[in-house]
Amino acid sequence: MHERKGAFIHDGKLVLRLNKKVEVPIPKRALDWLNKRFAENPDKKTVRVFERGGKLVAQIILHKKNVVALPNNPLLVVVDLNSSHGIVVHYWDGGLIKTEKYKPPNRSAAWHNVKHLMKLRDVLYNQGCITQQQINKYSAIIRETLSGSMKSWIQQTVDKIVRRVRRIAKRHGKEPLVMIDVPDDESLRGTSLQRTLLSFAKYFENILSWYGIYFEEARLYSTVCPRCGEKLDLKMKTRNLRLMTCKKCGFEEERDKVPLYWALNKLLALKGEAF
């Protein structure tokens, strides 16, 4: 991207020099996001142009190189992507600072409503009760019902988590170390939830790399005891709590917090200490 080369941004438009000059309007929200990323001094800015479905597609690609070392005394951030809640994030600095839960949107109810609207629309149209203009209104209602893609949820949630990681680390005067438990659960394999969580992990790691935040992928179990390695049993279950216990050593904790202890084990192992 350069004014004297193949592409540049001018007056809210992406200007491409192909066989002829092509101007592509950039939505204001996307332009604001780009301006923030440009202000963070990327090492390389390129534009990828290709055809898809008979349309010209232009992608702005920003590269940034960061050499990140393992922090000596880090703020530990544990991101569990195997949780039934979708995503659970723990912040630890000598003690648990806070735990946050993010659940992917459930679109099954929306699809149920859409099917009902489509069925009603078709019945009325076959009976000659509605015009084409009214059919267009039904289509607009259907689009509004399904508005908000999973991709946008992933991007918004990742951005929110990364902002909080940076803010909490700054408040505690430390560099963050993020441990990510990428899903490898047999019960999730091949499901839409696994695809969502894997997409989340890929985008999350990309943004962490952009900001130079150290991260590691680690297997953080929720049903195995972090002290003795025995299988944990479910002691009590309520709507908001699943209490796990180990019959061998007596360890007891909420299931969503068990991965935090595994992360602490790995962190202490880096320091040559024991849990």
Image: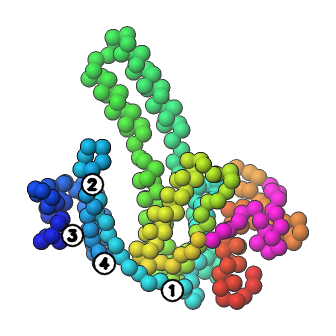
3D distance between C-alphas at marks 4 and 2:
23 Å
Q: Position of residue 102 (x, y in %)?
A: 55, 57
3D distance between C-alphas at marks 4 and 3:
12 Å
Which quadrant is home to the C terminus? bottom right
Disc sitting over residue 50 in the figure: 2
Q: Classify residue 213 as left or right of residue 232.
A: left
Which residue corresponds to the image point at 37% horizontal and 36% vertical from the top-left? 143
Earlier-in-chain disc, 1 versus 2: 2
SS type, badge 1: loop
Q: Position of residue 93 (x, y in %)?
A: 60, 80
Which residue corresponds to the image point at 45% horizontal and 31% vertical from the top-left? 114
Earlier-in-chain disc, 3 versus 1: 3
Q: Residues within 10 Å of mark 1 (few under 14, many from 20)?
A: few
3D distance between C-alphas at marks 3 and 2:
16 Å
Disc sitting over residue 1 in the figure: 3
Which residue corresponds to the image point at 59% horizontal and 71% vertical from the top-left? 217
Q: Which residue is mark 4?
A: 43
